Image (cartoon, rainbow, N blue to C red):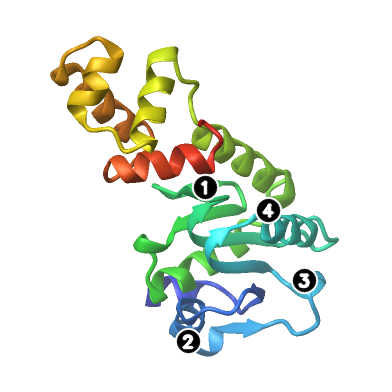
Amino acid sequence: MRTVLREDPTVWFTLFGDDVLAAEGIAAAGARLRFAPGGHDQADALLAVTIDLTDELAAALLQAAASRRRPAVLVVTASVGGHPLDRALASGPVHLLPRRDATAAGIAVLLHRIAAERSIADSPASHLTRLLADLSDQGRPRGLDQREARLLALLADGADTAAIARDLHCSSHTVKRLVRDLMQRYDARNRAHVVAHALQTGLI
């Protein structure tokens, strides 16, 4: 980290949100990172640290990234629009970093790095739009067939494996396999989590 900070000039940035992790990341870079109180037009980079990258915050970042200075964007978040962010995504001057992988020093280093790369021809706003669209596509639930839809409805009614097997005219082993497939598809921890996801996303 010291080498990176020595090589990079002072970075002016705008912070979106109020988060302890962001504050620690800023402190890790010491005097080399400076807050830009004048707004995003003066910023080299934008830093957003949040639990969930909501549509509202994404819109604010897009608007700021499209400003005349065209700052780079670093988003540290646990999820995007309610969908888990399971890996770091980078596209030119835009970086999305999972919160669980973020460290104070790492935030400082990435801020410098993306600020140094912000001269890339394509704007941060267009990169961020593309990344958010990709994440939205990845998070969109896959359609259910008739049996899966019936299985979810039965789970929501509290039916056990034996009752579901009788209703679907299949074995208990098949029911367990179908439930396991749904849990893997929607990254659910248990049956209740599958049902909660289905209700939240309008599957049932």
> Is residue 176 among what the camera can see?
no
Q: Residue at x 44, y 13 (%)?
A: 146
Neighbour tally class for label 1: few under 14, some 14-19, many 20 plus, Cα within 10 Å: some
Q: CA distance from mark 4 to mark 3?
A: 19 Å
Amino acid identity at mark 2: Ala
Say which label, 1 or 2, has the lower sequence index.
Answer: 2
Say which label, 3 or 2, has the lower sequence index.
Answer: 2
Residue 72 point in image, percent of width and height: 66, 60
Q: CA distance from mark 3 to mark 2?
A: 20 Å
State the residue position of label 1: 90
Residue 106 point in image, percent of width and height: 41, 69
> Is residue 110 among what the camera can see?
yes
Report the side of 187 relative to 64 (left or right).
Answer: left
Say which label, 4 or 1, has the lower sequence index.
Answer: 4
Amino acid identity at mark 1: Ala
Neighbour tally class for label 3: few under 14, some 14-19, many 20 plus, Cα within 10 Å: many
Q: Residue at x 39, y 47 (%)?
A: 86
Q: Secondary structure at mark 3?
A: helix
Q: Secondary structure at mark 2?
A: helix
Between marks 4 and 2 in the image, the one whose residue lies nearer the viewer = 4
Say which label, 1 or 3, has the lower sequence index.
Answer: 3
Q: CA distance from mark 1 to mark 2?
A: 24 Å
State the residue position of label 3: 40
Amino acid identity at mark 3: His
State the residue position of label 2: 27
State the residue position of label 4: 55
Q: Residue at x 47, y 82 (%)?
A: 20
Q: Secondary structure at mark 1?
A: strand
Q: Is residue 127 above or below residue 166?
A: below
Neighbour tally class for label 2: few under 14, some 14-19, many 20 plus, Cα within 10 Å: some
